[in-house]
Structure formats: structure tokens, C-alpha cells
Amino acid sequence: MTKKRMLVVGSVAAVVLVVGGRMAFHSSSPAQAGAPAPAASVLITTAPLRQLDLTDLLAAFGEVTTGQVVAVSFPRAGQVSRLLVIPGQRVSQGTPLATLTSDPTARLAYTQAQSAVDFAQGELRRAEELFSLQLATQSQVDAARKALKDAESMLSTQRQLGGAVGTATVTAPFDGVVSAVPVAQGDRIQPGAVVVEIGPTNVLRVRLGIEPDDAHLIRLGMIVALAPIDDSTKAVSAPITEQQGVVDPKTQLVDAVALVRGANALVPGMHVRATINVGHHLSWAAPRAAVLTDAGGAYVFQVSGGKAHRVNVVQGMESQGMVAISGSLDARLPIVVVGNYELQDGMPVRQGAA
């Protein structure tokens, strides 16, 4: 038992000596005693800072409506016996819109005018017979002739007012969309009362909302690219034909109107995105991905001496993927376009493949 215990104690002591020696060796290694950790660097991709002639594009949103609305009416009084269309319905030229039954008063006035013509014709014949027998004067014949002309004029007027027609149907004057039907079936209307309002579809109006700060950039005749919000590939071009000078109290925007002719991609009621070319300017430009923003505003990183340096900039309009920027930029230094989200001012960087 004594020998075994001595062997175990000796083995433990040997292990302690070996481990202690190794610990002492590592603790005294000059390479690890106080050597700083290597500085981390970020892999980036850069691009040269360029000065470009940029197109100033202004974005806006709007709604498509029909062309100038035309009111369709009956020239006479009567009762709307049938309404044949509803608001929003598309109609072609000649499509029946409503049927009107003539007012009894108009029928009576036409009948009286017809009787007056018959009576005046008879009076003229009698006056001419008496004149041939020298029993009437020329002035009496002339008076009878004038009375006949007056009666015929009154009859023509009553005919134009529809007194000769029991019922009449009004039709669409052109291809379009019914925008409003201000009467109801059975209503009695006065001459000239609006029955149906129609907007043409061969010419569309697009009402755009412009931010008040940008309204001064809009000019009549500027070309606008219009496209459905969910499909930018169906863009059409149109000129601005109207510009409002006040802020709409509902939208708090300034309205401008673009006139679109023959655009099959747009239909009334559709919401569209508009891009307006408001001019050109020469400016320093950076790819959109190179410009970042935080609480301090917009900024970019430029690389000098293997380190990234933050440069605060003023961000302008975006055109064709490039953003106009201005600030304390060094035209000789590249800007970071990939990897800039990981950077801080003064951080070491290494260049990756473009």
C-alpha cells in the first residue's frame, strides 16, 4: 500500500509540474503580452464621383376623368317616361339615353298654332277673291297675307319645341361615358333641363396633385409621363393644359391637368403616377445606393488613404438612378456604393471587385 501511494503522489506531482511549466511559458510569451488586436476592415465597392447633366423629374399622383362633360337636354317641356342609361355606363354615338313624353300644354299650343295657320289661309283666300271682285282693297289682302306668315312662324316654333311629337328620344352625341343622370324616371322637366351628362372618352383629363412647394416648377405645355400605379410599363405622354393657382382645401395640393388623347391604357376613374420633366441642371451625382440618411441628414462615404470618411451632403432630385448631391466633396476621391451601411467615419476599408 505504501509503494502504490508513493507512485500516485509522484505522478500527480509530475503532472502539476508540466502544466505549471506550460502556463509559465505562455504567460511569458512576448508576442502575446500587450499586442493590440488587428483593426477590422470592411469590404466595399466604390465608384468615381461624376458631374452629370441631370434631368429634374417631379413625381405626382392623379386620377383619370373623362373629357369636358357635355349636358344633353330636351328642347321642350315634358315628362321623362324612360331612362335608358345609368352613371358610369359607356355609350356610343347614337345610343338612346332617355325618352320624353311631350307636355300636354305643348301639345295644346301646337294644335292652336295649326288651327291659326288653317284659319289664316282661309282668310287670305277670301281676301284675294274679294279683291278680284273689287270688293276688297290691296291693304286687306296684304294684312291677310301677313297674318298667315305670322301663324306659320308660330307653328314652326311649336314644332321645334316638340309639340308635334307625342314622345321623343334623346341620343348620345358622341362616344363617351355617362358621368351623371340628374333626373329620375317620371320627373316633369322644363325646356332645356339637363337629362344626362356625358364625358368623351377619346380625350381624357388627368387631374394631378402637386405639392405647393413644387407648384412653381410647373408650366403649361410640359410633357407628363402617366402610368397606372401598379403597372409602369403602360406609360403614356401628355401635355399639361391647365394649372390651378390655389391650394385645394381637401387635398392641400395644387391641381394641374394633363390632356390625354386616345390612350387605351387609361380609363376614367383610374389612379395614375405622373413623372414630370421640369428641367435640367449640371450637378455632382452619385448612384442612389451611395446616398444614406440618418438623424444628421444625407451623407456619403469617400475613400482616402484606405479609410472611409463621411461627407454630409444636400440631396437633390433623382434621375435615372442618379441622385444630385452637393457638399464638401472631393472630386478626386471615389465614393462608396456597396458596403456603406457597415461603415463609420474613419473605418479601414478594403476594395472589392466592382
Image (cartoon, rainbow, N blue to C red):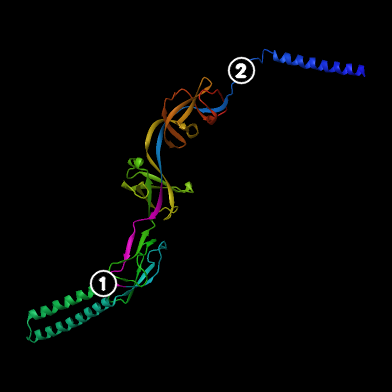
- Give, as a single range, the part of the protein colored magenta: 61-78
- Closer-to-camera residue (178/33): 33
Q: Is residue 67 magenta?
A: yes
Nearest-to-viewer mark from 2 and 1: 2
Tell me the quarter of the picture where residue 129 sits.
Answer: bottom left
One can see residue 160 in this view? yes
Q: Earlier in the sequence, mark 2 or mark 1?
A: 2
Label 1 neighbourhood size at 10 Å, few (<14), some (14-19), many (20+)?
some
Q: Residue at image x 21%, y 82%?
A: 115
Any part of residue 175 in sight: no
Q: Is residue 311 above or below residue 136?
A: above
Q: Is residue 61 left or right of residue 101?
A: right
Residues at marks 2 and 1, CA–CA distance in whole angstroms: 105 Å
Query: Label 2 sits on what residue type?
Result: Pro
**Image position of 192 (left or right of 346):** left
Q: What mark, if any, has residue 36 been given in the picture?
A: 2
Q: Is residue 281 above or below residue 146?
A: above
Q: Quadrant of the N terminus?
A: top right
Q: Secondary structure at mark 2?
A: loop
User: Callout 2: 10 Å neighbours few (<14), some, many (20+)?
Assistant: few
- In percent of the image, x 26 and y 77: which residue is there? 105
**Residue under the point 46% across and 34% down:** 322
Q: What mark, if any, has residue 160 been given in the picture?
A: 1
Helix, strand or loop at label 1? It is helix
Q: Is residue 159 magenta?
A: no
Residue 259: horizontal and vertical position, in percent? Answer: 36, 51
Which secondary structure class fits the magenta region best?
Answer: strand
Q: Amino acid at mark 1?
A: Gln
**The C terminus sits in image quarter:** top right
- Decide: marks 2, 1 in contact (CB < 8 A)? no
Side of 184 where 35 appears, left or right:
right
